[in-house]
Amino acid sequence: MPDRSAPIGVFDSGVGGLTVAREIMAQIPNERIIYFGDTARVPYGSKSKATITKFTKQIVRFLMTQHVKALVVACNTMSAYAIDEVEKEVSLPVIGVVKPGARIAVSETKNNRIGVIATEGTVGSGMYERFINNIDPGIRVFAKACPLFCPLVEEGMLDDPVTDEIARRYLKELMDKDIDTLIMGCTHYPLLAPALKRLVGESVRLVNPAYETARELKQMLTYKDMLNDSPFDKQEKDHEFYVSDLADKFTHFAADILDDDSIRTSEVDIEKY
Amino acid sequence: MPDRSAPIGVFDSGVGGLTVAREIMAQIPNERIIYFGDTARVPYGSKSKATITKFTKQIVRFLMTQHVKALVVACNTMSAYAIDEVEKEVSLPVIGVVKPGARIAVSETKNNRIGVIATEGTVGSGMYERFINNIDPGIRVFAKACPLFCPLVEEGMLDDPVTDEIARRYLKELMDKDIDTLIMGCTHYPLLAPALKRLVGESVRLVNPAYETARELKQMLTYKDMLNDSPFDKQEKDHEFYVSDLADKFTHFAADILDDDSIRTSEVDIEKY
C-alpha cells in the first residue's frame, strides 16, 4: 500500500526542470515535490549516454533516500538516454518528458510532419522519433540540435535580435520540411516560446512536453490510487529543493520561475550516491 | 633527484587546455605530456569555488598516479580558484595560466589600463586583478565575463556576424574604459582572436596566457634542473590524453588543434579519485 502523502521526486540537470515542477504544482496542487538539479555537472546535453546514465542513477539513489512515491525525469536528455535504467533501478512509477511530448505532438499534427528541437544528446538518441513512430509509423520526424539555446536562455537573452537570428538558422531546415508541429524538446526552450512563435508563425503548433508530463503524472497517480488526498500545506511541510552546486543562484532562479519567495535550497554531494 | 624523463601533467575542464599543451610542445619539445580534460563535468566557468576545488583535487590525484614531474593548470577558472589548494596537495612544481597572463599584460600596457575577458568564475574570483596589482598597484583592471564565448567556440562559430555582435556587446564597456591591453582569460578565447582583433583594433594588444605559461614552465624546469635532456620520441612513448567522457569527440578536436592524427584518448572515471 503506497503512502499517498509521500512526495514526488522531480529531477533535472539544472534549473530547466523547474518548468515541469511548476506544471505539476499547478495541475496536482496537493502533491509535495522534492526537486534535484545537478548544477555541479550541468549541462548534460552534449555528454555521452554512459555518463548521463551514471549521473542519473546517482540522482535516483539520492531521491530514494527522500522516500518519494514516484519519479519525474524532468530533463529531455536524461529521459531520452537513461529512463530504462531508472525503471530497472526502482520499483516506483517513473515518468519522463519525452513520451508525453511525443504523444501530444502526434495528436496535434495534421500533415504528419513533426519537428523536434533539443540538445545534441536528445537528438542523437533518436528517442522522439522512436516514440512517435511507435504510435504512428507514418509520421515523418525532423530533429535539430540547438546547442546555443540553453546558454542564451541562461544569459537571459529571451527577447533579443541575436537569439532571433540563431533561432532562424536552427529552424530553417525544419521549416523547409513543412512541419506543422514543433516539439520544444528541452526544458529550457519554453522560455524562448515567444521568439520561436514569431519565427514559425501561426501555422505551426508549439508543443511544451512539461504540460503533458504533469497530466500523465496525474493520470498515473489516479490510476494507481496514489494521489495525495490531503491538501498541500507549505506551513507544515514545504516543497524541497536540492542541488549539487550554487544553491543561492538556484534559489533566485526558482523563486522567479515558481513565483515563490520562500524557497530554500540545500546542497548535496551527489557523487557520493 | 627528480626524474627528468617523467611527463608533465596538463589539465583543463575540457578541450581548451589543448591550446596550452600546444604551446608547451612547441617551446619545450623534449617534454612528454599527460593531458586530462574533464569532459563529463565541463564547463567549470559558472560553478562555485568549492565545486571547482573538489573537481581540481580529483584531477590532481589522477595525474599523480601517472608519475608526472610537474603540473600545469591549463584552465583559467581552476587557476583562479584552486591553484593554492593544488600547491598544498602536492610537492611538485605547479604552474597556472593566470599569473603568467597577468605578468605579460603588465609588461605590455603603456597606459596602465588592462582589460580581462573570462568566464564568470574567473572574473568573480578577482584573481587577474589581484595578481596584476601585486606587481603594480597603479594599474587599473577592468574585467568582463563572456559566458557565450565558449559555446560559440564549441559551435565552431569563429568567423560569424552573430559572434561579432555578441563580442561587440561584451567588449563595449572595456573599450569605453580606454584599455590598451586585453587578456584572453579563458583558453577557448584565443580561437576568437581574429574576431576580437577586428573589434579592438591595432591600438589594443591581445594577450594569450598560453604562450607565457609555456615560457614560465620552461624557465622553472630549467631552474630546477628538471628539463628532459633526451629528445621526445613518440614512437617509443607518446603524449597521453585522458578525458572523463566522449573520448572520440576529444580525439577529433585534439587532432585538429595539435595537427596530429595519431592521438588516442582514454576515458577515466574521475569521480573515483
Image (cartoon, coloured by chain):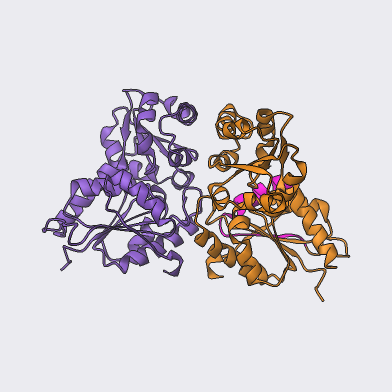
Chain colours: A orange, B purple
Residue displayed at 81% across by 63% down: A221
Query: Which quadrant of the rendered structure holds the C terminus of chain A?
Result: bottom right
- The spot of residue B251 in percent (x, y) is 35, 52
- The spot of residue B46 in percent (x, y) is 51, 48
Residue displayed at 27% across by 44% down: B259
Residue B78 at least partly seen: no
In the displayed structure, A39 sits above or below B98; it is below
Please give the range of residues in magenta: A238-262
Name the side, left or right, on which A183 lies relative to B233: right
Residue displayed at 36% across by 67% down: B61
In the displayed structure, B181 sits above or below A92; it is above
Classify residue B34 by image quadrant. bottom left
Residue displayed at 78% across by 58% down: A217
Name the side, left or right, on which B64 lies relative to A238: left
Closer to the camera in the image, A99 or A89? A99
In the displayed structure, B209 sits above or below A34; it is above
In the displayed structure, A216 sits above or below A272; it is above
Name the side, left or right, on which B173 lies relative to B90: right
- The spot of residue B148 in percent (x, y) is 49, 38
Classify residue B71 by image quadrant. bottom left
Name the side, left or right, on which A56 lies relative to B27: right
Magenta span contains residue A164? no
Closer to the camera in the image, B194 or A247? B194
Classify residue B8 by image quadrant. bottom left
